[in-house]
Image (cartoon, rainbow, N blue to C red):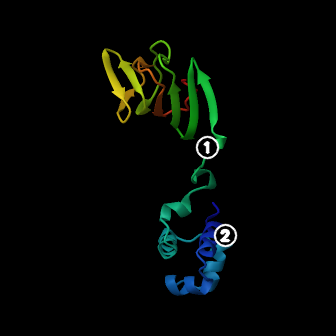
Amino acid sequence: MDIGTKIRAIRNRKKITIAQMCEGTGLSKGFISNVENNNTSPSINTLNTIASFLGVPLPYLLLEKKQHMHVVRKDSRRKSTFNDLKIEHLTSKGGLRMMMVEFPPGATIGEPHAHEGEECHQVLEGKILAEQGEDSIIVEAGDSFSWNASVPHFVKNIGDEKAVVLIAIYSDTELIDVM
């Protein structure tokens, strides 16, 4: 872990001097220097003192770089198609994936299908028919629904205009593209 470099970066970004940090934490200049240079591993209690002084949550100091926030810019999103659907892959983290799916009038996801995981849907535009097992509901812009994806499910645009649906899929295992 590179906690010291992260502490230094936060301190510098906030324009805090080592002297100010010594005064605010009660730690010595030499100790802070050793921490920032990764020459010593401070206790959790000491890290908590440093985190409090810097105004960051303690767990943030413990995150590895790959665990930090991941940003996908609008122009960098991966796009794909499935049947007549346009899919924008917004972001993913672990077993969680978000996408925006555009359904032209009459378009469907195809035959009812099932896969591992949970799904949550937010209808942003249009009117769709959502079916899962024996349940069937018409949802419109502003409505949301969720289901266990291991039960066969089906979605179709039943409106005269395109429908746009924000979909979040979670699975304990890595998801292959389900659409």
Secondary structure, mark 2, is: loop
**Residue shown at 49%/71% (left/top)?**
55
**Residue shown at 66%/42% (left/top)?**
76
Q: Position of residue 8 (x, y in %)?
A: 63, 72
Residue 27 visible in this rendered orientation of the protein:
yes
Q: Position of residue 39 (x, y in %)?
A: 67, 72
* Residue found at the very far top of the displayed protein: 111
**Image-based side of 155 in relation to 2, left or right:** left
Using the image, determine if residue 50 lies above or below residue 166. below
What numbered label is drawn on residue 38? Answer: 2
What crowding class fits label 2: few (fewer than 14 Cα within 10 Å), some (14-19), or many (20 or more)? Answer: some
**Residue shown at 42%/30% (left/top)?**
118
What crowding class fits label 1: few (fewer than 14 Cα within 10 Å), some (14-19), or many (20 or more)? Answer: few
**Residue shown at 61%/80% (left/top)?**
31
Instruction: State the count of labels.
Output: 2
Instruction: Check the picture and name the quadrant holding the C terminus.
Output: top right
Residue 1 lies in quadrant: bottom right
